[in-house]
Amino acid sequence: MNILVTGATSGFGAAIARRFVHEGHRVVATGRRAERLDALATECGERLHPLVLDVRDRAAVEAAVAALPAEFAQVDVLVNNAGLALGLKPAHETDMADWEQMVDTNIKGLLYITRALTPGMVDRGRGHVINLGSVAGEWPYPGGNVYGGTKAFVRQFSLNLRADLVGLGVRVSNIEPGMAETEFSLVRFQGDAERAKSVYAGVQPLTADDIADTVYWIATRPAHVNVNTISLMPECQAFSPFNVKR
């Protein structure tokens, strides 16, 4: 299979790319940090094609898809992993630029690459779109405002995309992880390593490899099986009482 993974320079994306290459598949690994993609390509060898790409740039996405090397061009599985959370301030105090960046990446970037690749999948009668959502798309928490809203969009868009593609041989899945230790919190807290580290203190969170294993399992089900949604958390995480201010 040919796999295209967005946001492959770290965390989930890098682990997903490694897993598919290890299993003998070809991977187009996209991201904004060229040096990290080059290191991943050196590690993974000729089965991995590094592609510097900002999914927020619609024209760049369309051009990149059109220019894929022949052996990578027919993408069988798109893993929409690129995304981020910024800040934990309440809505009335947050920076509008943070909201815009989350919408541009988590929603619009996902739309651009999905729209660029799904016509080819439909033409070939096979394909799979696997979106990385979040439990934040279903369960609210203070400070999750727009991040949670973007992941709720991913959840509903995945279901609606599935409805559009039914019977055409193209599957759609949404994975909703809970707490997982990657660069996620480091990005959310704008490089504050101590604050990011404190998020995982005293717990055993999910790992990037756990998510890569889940993506690989979904992608390798028989063609007649469509996994709609998987929600997963570490054992140490669950659901909380309602938030009541007294």
Image (tube, rainbow, N blue to C red):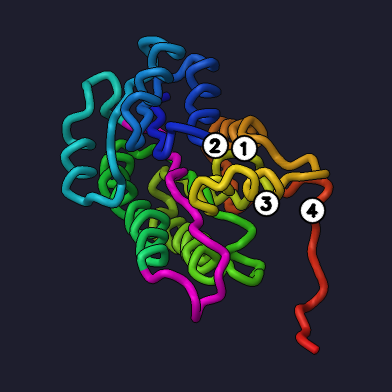
- Quadrant of the frame with the N terminus: top left
Amino acid identity at mark 1: Ile
Give yes or no for residue 82 being in the magenta stretch: yes
Label 1 vs label 2, nearer the camera: 2
Point out which mark residue 12 bears. 2
Circles 1 and 2, Cβ within 8 Å, touching? The answer is yes
SS assignment at label 1 = helix
Q: How far, Cα to Cα, is label 4 from label 2?
A: 19 Å
Residue drawn 36% across and 65% down?
A: 97
SS assignment at label 3 = loop
Front residue of this view, candidates 96 and 68: 96
> How crowded is the residue under tag 4: few (<14 C-alpha within 10 Å), some, or many (20+)?
some
In screen coordinates, is 135 left or right of 149? right
Q: Main secondary structure of the magenta part?
A: loop
Looking at the picture, does residue 89 appear above or below residue 43? below
Q: Quadrant of residue 165?
A: bottom left
List the residue tagged with mark 3: 178
List the residue tagged with mark 1: 211
Point out which mark residue 237 bears. 4
Circles 4 and 3, Cβ within 8 Å, touching? The answer is yes
Q: How far, Cα to Cα, is label 1 from label 3?
A: 10 Å
